[in-house]
Image: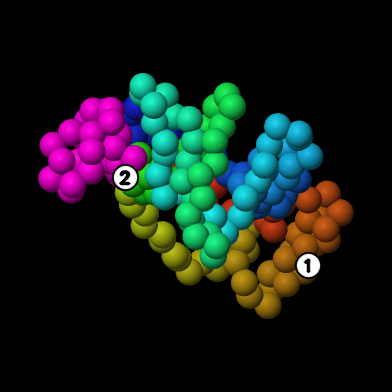
């Protein structure tokens, strides 16, 4: 799903641990929050990257107190998602030179692919009515099975309640 070719089918990648969905903060930041070389700032969105000789040296963040510069000794990881990451790069002067110039942004590094080729994940959910009680669904006859699935989830963190319901796609 995250490769060069977007056509095909497969199991969705999720941040799930022991049958529970997790945010990226819980899955990736919490285990590392006690590291001495990591400082986590919340409620401080990045305005732009500071670039010197095509090397990012820091970031400008906004908070209630105003703008603040945060410098890095070694590296910066930009991980703001498929929409905000290109927006931050482009505000920083990294992107298609013509687009940046038209927007009044000084070109720091001409990189035409930034902000291009974003593809949405189209989906279509199908519902069906069936007399068969094998698939999961909500009905009075299904209550014993649903109760068992709940117990199974509480004890072993597996089964229907550990699912994101949309297990795979194509």
Dot 2 falls on a residue whose secondary structure is helix
Residue 26 horizontal side relative to residue 89, left or right: right
The number of numbered discs placed on residues in the rendered structure image is 2
Asked whether 117 falls inside the magenta stretch, the response is yes
Would you identify the image quadrant in which residue 49 lies? top left
Q: Which residue is mark 2?
A: 91
**Image location (x, y in percent) of residue 108:** 28, 31
**Toward the viewer: 116 or 16?**
116
Q: Residue at x 15, y 41 (%)?
A: 101
The answer to whether residue 125 is magenta is no
Q: Main secondary structure of the magenta part?
A: loop
Does residue 162 appear in the picture of this structure?
A: yes
Q: Image quarter for residue 15?
A: top right
- Front one among 56 and 155: 56
Looking at the image, which residue sits at the far right?
155
Q: Residues under labels 2 and 1: Cα distance?
A: 52 Å
Of pointers 2 and 1, the one earlier in the residue sequence: 2
Residue 90 drawn at (x, y percent): 30, 41
Q: Where in the figure is residue 154, as x and y percent of width and height? A: 83, 58
Q: Residue at x 39, y 31 (%)?
A: 51
The label shown at residue 147 is 1
**Residue 60 position within the rendered picture, expressed as x and y whole percent measured from the top left:** 46, 46
In the rendered view of the protein, which quadrant contains the C terminus? top left
Name above or below for residue 132 compared with residue 46.
below
86 sits left or right of 152 in the view:
left
The magenta stretch is 90-119
Numbered circle sitting on residue 97: none
């Amino acid at each position: 799903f995250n490769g060069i070719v977007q056509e095909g089918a497969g199991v969705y990648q999720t941040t799930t641990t022991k049958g529970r969905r997790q945010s990226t903060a819980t899955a990736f930041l919490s285990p590392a929050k006690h590291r001495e070389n990591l400082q986590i700032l919340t409620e401080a969105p990045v305005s732009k990257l500071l670039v010197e000789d095509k090397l990012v040296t820091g970031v400008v963040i906004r908070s209630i107190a105003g703008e603040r510069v945060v410098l890095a000794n070694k590296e910066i990881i930009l991980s703001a998602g498929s929409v905000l990451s290109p927006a931050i790069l482009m505000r920083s002067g990294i992107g298609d030179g013509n687009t940046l110039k038209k927007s009044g942004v000084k070109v720091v590094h001409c990189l035409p692919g930034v902000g291009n080729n974003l593809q949405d994940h189209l989906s279509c959910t199908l519902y069906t009515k069936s007399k068969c009680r094998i698939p999961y669904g909500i009905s009075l006859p299904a209550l014993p099975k649903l109760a068992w699935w709940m117990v199974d989830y509480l004890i072993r963190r597996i089964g229907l309640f550990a699912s994101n319901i949309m297990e795979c796609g194509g």
